[in-house]
Image (cartoon, rainbow, N blue to C red):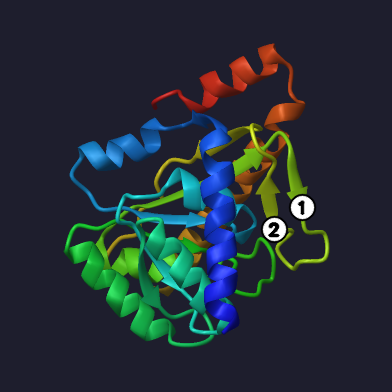
C-alpha cells in the first residue's frame, strides 16, 4: 500500500518543482554528436541528482535500469509516468536480466541510462554495467551531472540526495563519450571503467562548483567544455 502513495507524492513533487527550474547546459554537443550520428547512447549519472535528471530527461522514451527492491518499485511508477521505460535489475539482483533488456532496447533504437552508484552505493563509485553494455552493443557512454544553485540535501542518505528548491538555477554538464571496443579484453575493460569513473567525477565537480564561480570564471569554463577537439 505504501508504494502507490510514495510514488504519487514523488511524482507530484517533480511535476510541481520541475517547470520552475532554470536549466543551463554545458557540453551539450557531446550528446548532440551521438544523436546526429544516428547512434543510440548509454547514459550514466550519480544517484544524487536523480530528482533533477528525471525532469530534465522526461518524455524521451529513455530506458532506466531499475531495482527490484521496495524503493525500485515506487521509483518505477514515478519514472514511467514521466515518460521513461524501465529494465528490472540492479548490480546485486537481476543484473544479467536487466542488461539483456537494455541491450534489446538499444537494438530497438532507444537510449538507456544507469544511476551508476545505485541502488545503495558506495556513493560515487561507478558500477560496471554501462561498460559491459557498451562492449556488447557498441553504443557510446555519455556521463552527466546536474548541480543546483539552491537545493535541499538529505545529509543522512547514503547518496546525499538532492531536491532543488523551486525557481532555482541548475546546470547540467555532459562529458565526451566513452567508447568501448566490442572486442575489448579484461585490461581494456578496466581502463574504460577507470575512464568512465574519471568522467563522472569531472562532471560532478564541475556542476557542483558552478554557482561558486564568478561570471568570468563560468565563461571560461564553458568555453573549455564546449571546445570541440
| Left or right, residue 150 beside residue 19 | right
Which residue in the protein does label 2 denote? 161
Q: Nearer the viewer, residue 180 or 154?
A: 154
Please say whether residue 145 is visible from this viewpoint.
no
| Left or right, residue 155 beside residue 81 | right
Q: Secondary structure at mark 2?
A: loop
Q: Nearer the viewer, residue 124 or 158?
A: 158
Note whether 211 is above or below 106 in the view shown: above
Extreme top residue here?
A: 216
* Identity of the residue drawn at 44% across and 80% down: 89
The label number, if any, that marks residue 39 in the structure image: none
Extreme right residue here?
A: 156
Which residue in the protein does label 1 denote? 153
Note whether 137 is above or below 23 in the view shown: below
* Identity of the residue drawn at 61% across and 34% down: 170
How many marks on residues?
Answer: 2
Q: CA distance from mark 1 to mark 2?
A: 6 Å
Please say whether residue 94 is visible from this viewpoint.
yes
Q: Position of residue 106 (x, y in %)?
A: 24, 63
Q: The N terminus appears in which quarter of the rendering?
A: bottom right
Q: Position of residue 92 (x, y in %)?
A: 54, 85
Q: Secondary structure at mark 1?
A: strand
Whether pointer 1 and pointer 2 mark residues with C-beta atoms closer than 8 Å, the reply is yes
Q: The C terminus appears in which quarter of the rendering?
A: top left
Mark earlier in primary sequence (1, 2): 1
Note whether 173 is above or below 13 in the view shown: above
Q: Position of residue 103 (x, y in %)?
A: 27, 71
Amino acid at each position: 500500500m505504501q508504494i502507490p502513495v510514495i510514488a504519487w507524492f514523488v511524482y507530484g513533487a517533480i511535476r510541481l518543482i520541475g517547470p520552475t527550474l532554470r536549466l543551463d547546459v554545458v557540453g551539450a554537443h557531446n550528446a548532440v554528436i551521438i544523436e546526429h550520428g544516428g547512434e543510440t547512447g548509454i547514459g550514466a549519472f550519480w544517484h544524487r541528482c536523480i530528482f533533477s535528471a528525471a525532469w530534465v530527461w522526461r518524455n524521451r522514451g529513455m530506458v532506466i535500469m531499475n531495482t527490484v527492491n521496495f524503493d525500485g518499485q515506487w521509483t518505477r511508477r514515478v519514472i514511467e509516468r514521466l515518460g521513461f521505460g524501465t529494465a528490472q535489475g540492479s548490480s546485486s539482483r537481476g543484473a544479467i536480466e536487466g542488461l539483456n533488456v537494455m541491450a534489446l532496447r538499444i537494438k530497438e533504437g532507444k537510449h538507456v541510462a544507469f544511476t551508476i552508484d545505485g541502488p545503495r552505493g558506495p556513493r560515487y563509485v561507478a558500477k560496471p554495467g554501462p561498460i559491459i553494455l557498451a562492449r556488447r552493443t557498441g553504443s557510446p557512454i555519455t556521463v552527466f551531472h546536474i548541480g543546483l544553485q539552491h537545493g535541499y540535501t538529505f545529509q543522512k542518505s547514503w547518496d546525499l540526495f538532492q531536491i532543488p528548491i523551486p525557481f532555482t538555477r541548475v546546470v547540467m554538464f555532459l562529458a565526451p563519450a566513452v567508447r568501448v571496443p566490442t572486442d575489448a579484453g579484461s585490461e581494456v575493460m578496466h581502463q574504460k571503467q577507470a575512464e568512465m569513473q574519471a568522467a563522472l567525477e569531472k562532471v560532478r565537480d564541475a556542476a557542483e562548483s558552478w554557482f561558486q564561480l564568478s561570471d568570468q570564471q563560468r565563461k571560461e569554463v564553458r568555453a573549455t567544455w564546449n571546445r570541440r577537439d
